[in-house]
Image (spheres, rainbow, N blue to C red):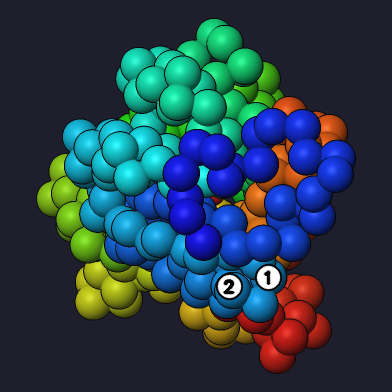
Amino acid sequence: MACGKEDSGRKDNSSEPSKSSRLVTVGYVQSGTGSAWSLANVESIKQNCTEENGINLIYECAEDDFDTQLSIVHSFIEQKVDLISFTPIVSEGWEDVLKEAKEAGIPVIIMDRMVETGDDTLFNCWIGSNFLLEGYKAADWLIDYMKSLGSKKDKFNVALFQGALGSSAEVGRTQGVEEMLKTAGNFRFVYKETGNFNRAGGINNMEKVLRQKLDIDVLIAENDDMALGAIEVMEKNGIKPGKDIVIVSFDGIHDAFQAMVDGKINCVMECNPLTGKLLANAVKTVMDGNPISKKNYVLEELFPADTAADYIDNRKY
Ligand code: GZL
């Protein structure tokens, strides 16, 4: 199928078959693949954005480099793809390239993380998670859990391992947990650093916490890969994860559920990566010129450790 402008379904085509019934060329660029979550997300997109579903997918990965991601989106515009989609590494800095796509008449679907452009006409729709709510839910659970331990401490020391700084996932989770725990009054953040959503980041930060001889009651890791890295370091140093240090994490990958079953993580806030079908459906809707909500939130739940055994066998990532 030509992916030229005239074939991209943006004209009135009432007399022709639905454009979405013909192959649509979609340029998709993933932020990176450094976490199990992102690998599951890529798999879901590749499994659903297929020719059987009317899509010719051009898949690229920016490997967590924002300039690379921008240049890949520019290349999609030059290739005159029918539609552009991406998971923005960071929220800022998207105005120019999105204006270029708009001027080229190429629709844009943003996945997972959000962009901050101040002009939501620069994209057709967004499908992803409510990261602020994720942070609130995780913190809310933690407040009750620490109360249930009956500790005599008036303040709990918290280490926060943040995700990729400036990503809406990191911004939302950080804001959510900080607001809730500061309001609760009996938590203080004694360590706060990014671990870039990867296992090495969890290892490096936990080693730094130990070098600084910080007395930590709680670790909040903004994704499971960092939590699992931290657990590795804790166990090497005779610290019992989930007991000596309460651990709350985000994503809900299988290994995190196993860690909860093993008593090493106390609670996981799910962040659903299985959005490939939602993207494929949104492509059809947009290319047919049908209305679509600007923001589409995926469903996700909070999993305290005592529920993990009931769910682990059904986890899909
Ligand atoms: C959140 C997603 C985050 C995950 C990390 O939707 O952008 O990026 O929480 C991933 O695991 O690296």
- Residue type indicated by callout 2: Thr
Q: Nearer the viewer, residue 262 or 227?
A: 227
Secondary structure of the residue carrying numbered label 2: loop
Q: Is residue 149 left or right of residue 55?
A: right
Q: Amino acid at mark 1?
A: Asn
| Placement of 264 over or under 156, stated as above or below | below
Task: Please identify the quarter of the rendering in which residue 13 is found.
Answer: top right
Question: What secondary structure is found at the residue carrying circle 1?
Answer: helix
Q: Residue at x 80, y 49 (%)?
A: 16
- Name the residue at the bottom extreme: 313
Locate residue 276 relative to residue 224 in the image: left or right. Answer: right
Residue at (58% x, 72% y) in the render: 50
Residue lying farthest top? 118
Q: Which mark is residue 293?
A: none
Task: Tell me residue 77's x, y (percent).
Answer: 36, 36
Q: Which residue is mark 1?
A: 53
Where is residue 100 drawn, in percent x and y? Answer: 39, 21
Residue 104 percent coordinates (x, y): 45, 26
Q: Quadrant of the C terminus?
A: bottom right
* Marks 1 and 2 close (CB-CB < 8 Å): yes
Question: For mark 2, what is the residue?
Answer: 50
Q: Nearer the viewer, residue 26 or 31?
A: 26
List the single residue furthest toward the front.
15
Q: Is residue 18 above or below residue 67?
A: below
Measuring 65% from the left and 66% from the top, which residue is drawn there? 54
